[in-house]
Image (cartoon, grey):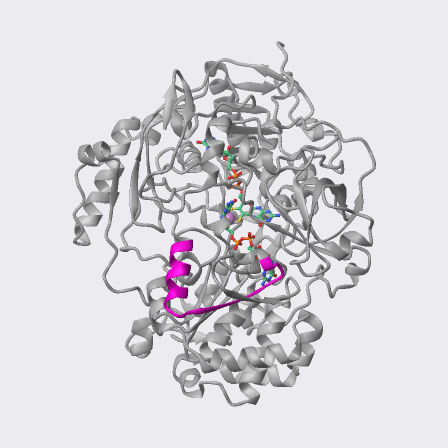
Amino acid sequence: MEVEGDRIASISASPRDEHPSALLQSIPGAVHADCRIDRPYVRKGWLHGDRAGGTIRGAESFVPMSWDEATRLVGEELSRVGSEFGRSAIYGGSYGWSSAGRFHHAKSQLQRMLAATGGYTGAKTNYSYATGMTLLPHILGDSAMVEGPLVEWRAIAENAKLMVCFGGMLLRNGQVSNGGPGVHEMETWVRHAARSGVKFVYVSPAKADFFSGVEAEWVPIRPNTDTAFMLAVAHVLISESLVDEAYCARYTTGYDRLRQHILDSAYTPSWAARITGIPEATIVSFARRISAHPTAMTANWSLQRAEFGEQPFWMLIALGAMLGSIGKPGLGVSFGHGSQGGMGAPRTRLPTIGLPSLPNPMKSDIPVARITDMLLGPAERYNYDGEEREYPHIRMIMWAGGNPFHHHQDLGRLSRAWARAQTIVVSEPWWTATARRADIVLPATTTFERNDIASGSRDRYTLAMKQALHPFAGARNDFDMYADIAEYCGARTLFTEGRDEGTWLRFMYGRFKQSASAHGVLVPDFEEFWERGFVEIEPPKEPHVPLASFLWDPIENPLSTPSGRIELYSETIGSFGYSDCIGHPTWFAPKEYLGADAAKTFPLHLLTAQPETRLHSQLDQARVSLDSKILGREPIVLNTSDAAHRGISEGDIVRVFNDRGSCLAGVRLTDDLLPQVAVMATGAWYDPLDPLDPDSMCIHGNSNVLTQDVGTSSLGQGPSAQSCLVDVERWHGALPAITVHMPPARSID
Ligand SMILES: Nc1nc2c(c(=O)[nH]1)N[C@H]1C(S)=C(S)[C@@H](COP(=O)(O)OP(=O)(O)OC[C@H]3O[C@@H](n4cnc5c(=O)[nH]c(N)nc54)[C@H](O)[C@@H]3O)O[C@H]1N2
Ligand SMILES: Nc1nc2c(c(=O)[nH]1)N[C@H]1C(S)=C(S)[C@@H](COP(=O)(O)OP(=O)(O)OC[C@H]3O[C@@H](n4cnc5c(=O)[nH]c(N)nc54)[C@H](O)[C@@H]3O)O[C@H]1N2
Ligand SMILES: [Mo]
């Protein structure tokens, strides 16, 4: 990276990285963007005593403040809300990716401060694979099969002849990994497997879901119907006696019940063909193929971010068990090889570097994607994973390192819910849609303005992230701002533990060095690491084989499930009595998919995929993302035939709409997408035409104005963004200028 004065002049990837991310080119533009926040601000109405924010948030001007004033206002508000309503009235779930470094991880810093000063209502699970991580412990004893380590690429290359990828294998998603990846290797591993003789088949609504250059066979499927396909594949395995009955008897419980259910319900290939759009013959030959060849199966996380998202994951595990392949080297089932960088890559299992958390004195939390339900329904009861719970009554929200007005579903509904809070404090480097909807805005530094350590849980590198720039204008590190707020509340030392940035980095690295050496791995001391810039930990010689010891001896090494086996019927889940997630996998028709009644009114299934040109909403204000827009609007990919009979052409602007909301988008056409499917990336900054109106059209193209905000089921309560029906029409109106990439109005008093 070249720095001139206090600006990044150019940036390039490490020579270690064979496939660097194109997103690097957006960094200078983002760091020096006009929409950086230069100092603390307070919403004018709030400053004058308005504690009923309403939908005025996002439409009112901001008054500049000194850091001392801002610190005092936040500190006072924490004390007031805490003493009037109790600390669980403060929501600090603060979901979001923040930036790569482990010390300046904004959410972790915020939550330490909130814990040190008395506690908060937190959040469980995530938006990525909430449903998988809640379901899998019931079925396999833990959630490793979705969080990693997965079935490893080296073992796949060596042992599999066929790899089935539900949702495809996406290089665009492989650019990204939590904590900051040292290298981008998804392409390397897929090519390695292909060269070793693995044939790839992917089941997906979009042909583009597998990258070009590696041969892969596309099985087009209607969105949200994978479970129906898998059930019919199971039906064929049963009818043609292709099930590994001995494996099911030894390693699973409930196979007989599932088998009976599949036969009784007549989940035949002809039944599934009508639902999935996959020809009957293809289903039959698919079943024969996966039983004839050593097969690895993976499903992307997108499959479970849909209504009844538990089912495709559970049913894929059932298929793996019926083939007798789970636990065999390089075979079986896992989730996410195509979702994110590092999934399935070899790695020595050491604890990653992290900021230790402080225990939250309030035992209050929600499944993270239920935030709107919580804000709208204080004291309302809800189900989650066998528990009957009650939503707390939230009066104050603090957010750092996340963008709910990008990431949450049904933004109109979120706007109404957001209006219920008395005080909202957001820390952000940029004037995002969320920062604009705060009462107190605290300007944060970016990664380039501080020292940190990157340590991905999914690759073998630990990286020194050295400060390259002075903090922008009045921006401060989250750590420093929360240390001062903690001090106001009398808890500075509890929060800082007497350390500053430098001593924290040494402390965190020291703990890592210690645990590495306990695992027999020697890493250099801090000075040498910082000087050299990275530590690479050699992966083990032998690939990791999940569930290998269980396969070896299921009595000696049982799974942590109640039965000790793979649960194809779960007594526990059955005993919850949920109608939307019963004791075994089954087909539930979503409310919104192409087979639903609602498709008569809104005939297109909208998939909101991860953006190739950004990280979620991050870097939307910079080059790679801006260059991808059409007349400034986020692209929507439509099938040529769907566009033709609506009189829509390539490059047109359309209005995308349903009962929940609408947005503008620029049209890209393709023949390689299933008809009646449309794809928009997430992350275009939310820019409603009338910020005072929660139903207003987003003129920029944030797809979350359209998605539905319901839990996957009473079990997982994960987000269901991928179950969303819409229609499109050509937009003949004027094209309002995008305003969200510029700072909002500011005033002096
Ligand atoms: N429709 C639909 N919606 C989705 C999804 C989908 O598939 N479809 N996917 C979901 C998924 S899987 C995810 S993970 C979420 C992602 O949602 P988020 O994680 O909320 O998205 P980001 O844009 O990464 O938001 C991170 C924010 O942190 C800010 N930030 C970065 N560094 C710092 C820092 O040092 N300090 C502070 N204070 N702030 C910082 C960034 O500027 C940015 O605004 O979106 C979810 N939303
Ligand atoms: N460049 C970039 N990469 C990212 C991110 C980013 O923001 N930018 N975000 C990261 C994060 S936080 C996450 S959680 C992961 C998410 O990883 P995923 O959840 O795997 O990603 P998506 O892009 O939502 O979906 C992948 C593909 O699944 C297909 N799909 C959708 N619904 C269905 C379905 O019902 N059935 C089948 N068979 N296929 C379906 C879509 O065609 C889509 O292209 O991505 C990570 N990678
Ligand atoms: Mo995610």
In the image, residue 702 above or below residue 75 = below
Quick one: 287 or 641, which is closer to the camera?
A: 641
- Lateral position of residue 348 relative to residue 447, left or right: left
Query: Can residue 663 be found in the magenta stretch?
Result: no
Residue 293 x/y as whole percent: 44, 79
Image quadrant occupied by the C terminus:
top right
* Tag count: 0
In the image, residue 532 above or below residue 308 = above
Image quadrant occupied by the N terminus:
top left
Residue 181 occupies which quadrant of the picture?
Answer: top left
Q: Which residues are magenta?
A: 187-207
Residue 186 occupies which quadrant of the picture?
Answer: bottom left
Quick one: 88 or 708, which is closer to the camera?
A: 708
Q: Can residue 469 be seen at all in this image of the molecule? A: no
Residue ID at (58%, 30%): 432
In the image, residue 528 above or below residue 385 = above
Residue ID at (23%, 42%): 511
Residue 200 x/y as whole percent: 48, 67
Residue 551 occupies which quadrant of the picture?
Answer: bottom left
